[in-house]
Image (spheres, grey):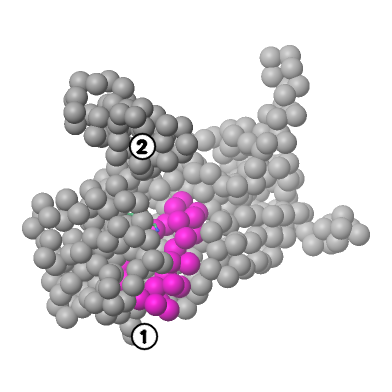
Amino acid sequence: MNHLELAGKLFHDGRYEEAAEHYRSARELDPHNWQAVTGYNRAIRRIVPRWHFEMMHDHERAVQYEAAIKQVVTADHLVLDVGTGSGMLALMAARVGAERVVACEGQPVVAEAARGIVAGAGYAAQVDVVPKMSTDLLVPGDLPRRADVLITETVDCGLLGEGILASIGHAREHLLTDQAIIVPGRARVLAQLVESRALHQKNTVGELHGFDLSGFNELASLEYFDSRLRRHEHRVLSAPFEVFRFDFHRDGPAPQQATLRVPPTAAGACHAVVFWFELELVPGITVTNAPDHPTTHWKQAVQCLPHPVAVHPNDPLAVDVRHDGLRICFTDISADTSTRKERQG
Ligand SMILES: C[S@@+](CC[C@H](N)C(=O)[O-])C[C@H]1O[C@@H](n2cnc3c(N)ncnc32)[C@H](O)[C@@H]1O
């Protein structure tokens, strides 16, 4: 089988990393082979999400991370960068003079790119790029000893979706000194109730073009998705309220649940909960994807409710929320706790 045939088979089997390698080899043999060029692009698209580029251009995120790194990293530090992507944060740590930086990246093609970027920047002697998930790192081996500083930016719009709680928890136990500095140190998740037919329609369908399509609502989901609140017509029905708080020096991925009492600030039909994070890198240096903070590359997390919930300023709501270490989910919102008891009874 030649490279192209093999690549096609691997792609079909969902083995995109290997498919990309064979498409690349085919492209190297014949740079004008369109099948090799498009095949490589398609395989890379499956492996490397496009948000990497938008994220790298997020100026504020970079400025805040560099300020935090400058504040904590000193010349005798061994720094561990979990999820290095392009290698940018590892390079920042090297530039401020860290003795050594180990930068791990779970996606091999991304790690390969980072290694080239680090060498190109002249920091290959100071920064080791390791193509592994942090949870597979060995001490000694991948790290010469436990690290003094952990830097990571492994958060999605809903904070937990990239597994930050588990990877920091594992690092504390296996990869860091007892006194290690962790950047980010803490985080809060905040939410707001909104009325928005436009958002509701992203997860619900009814009658359209003379047909009742509501059977498709079986496939609607309670999972959040990313969206920019300001781009959708909406009315806010509550002030922002705190959902969860995390201390990365202490907390792990154990599931949590809470019932929050939320007073609506306006009457309306609540279609969705919009939520975001405040990530405290070090005290006083924070990044956020709050809706009133439009410069962030992260959008907000939006969870549509299965059915609109009527809300009124005089009736506080009981909002049930939980996370399983990876995803935050609002499981029930009802007009008040007594209504809920009646319904459950
Ligand atoms: C949001 S990007 C951030 C990249 C880079 N740190 C930056 O700030 O520009 C997160 C990267 O971490 C990687 N990643 C996530 N969790 C990881 C883990 N536990 N170990 C290694 N890589 C991880 C992903 O593959 C992705 O490339």
Q: Which residues are magenta?
A: 149-175
Residue 194 in the figure: left or right of residue 166: right
How many numbered discs?
2
Amino acid type at mark 1: Asp
Residue under the point 33% across and 72% down: 138
Query: Can you name the residue that lies furthest to the front here?
Result: 1
Residue 321 in the figure: left or right of residue 138: right
Amino acid type at mark 2: Ala
Position above or below: 198 against 236: above
Q: Quadrant of residue 126?
A: bottom left
Q: Which mark is residue 198?
A: none
> Dot 1, crowdedness within 10 Å: few (<14), some or many (≥20)?
few
Residue under the point 27% across and 26% down: 37
* Rendered location of residue 176, percent (x, y): 34, 78
Q: Quadrant of residue 4?
A: top left
Residue under the point 25% across and 30% down: 26
* Rendered location of residue 206, percent (x, y): 72, 26
Q: Earlier in the sequence, mark 2 or mark 1?
A: 2
Q: Quadrant of residue 285?
A: bottom left
Q: Which residue is mark 2?
A: 19
Q: Which residue is mark 1?
A: 178
Residue under the point 69% across and 59% down: 319
Query: Can you name the residue that lies furthest to the bottom here?
Result: 178
Position above or below: 227 against 78: above
SS under mark 1: strand
SS under mark 2: helix
* Rendered location of residue 244, percent (x, y): 55, 66
Q: Which quadrant of the render holds ligand 1?
A: bottom left
Query: Can you name the residue that lies furthest to the left here?
Result: 122
Quadrant of the image for the C terminus? Answer: bottom right
Query: Can you name the residue that lies furthest to the right here?
Result: 345
Q: Tell which of 20 and 127 is nearer to you.
A: 20
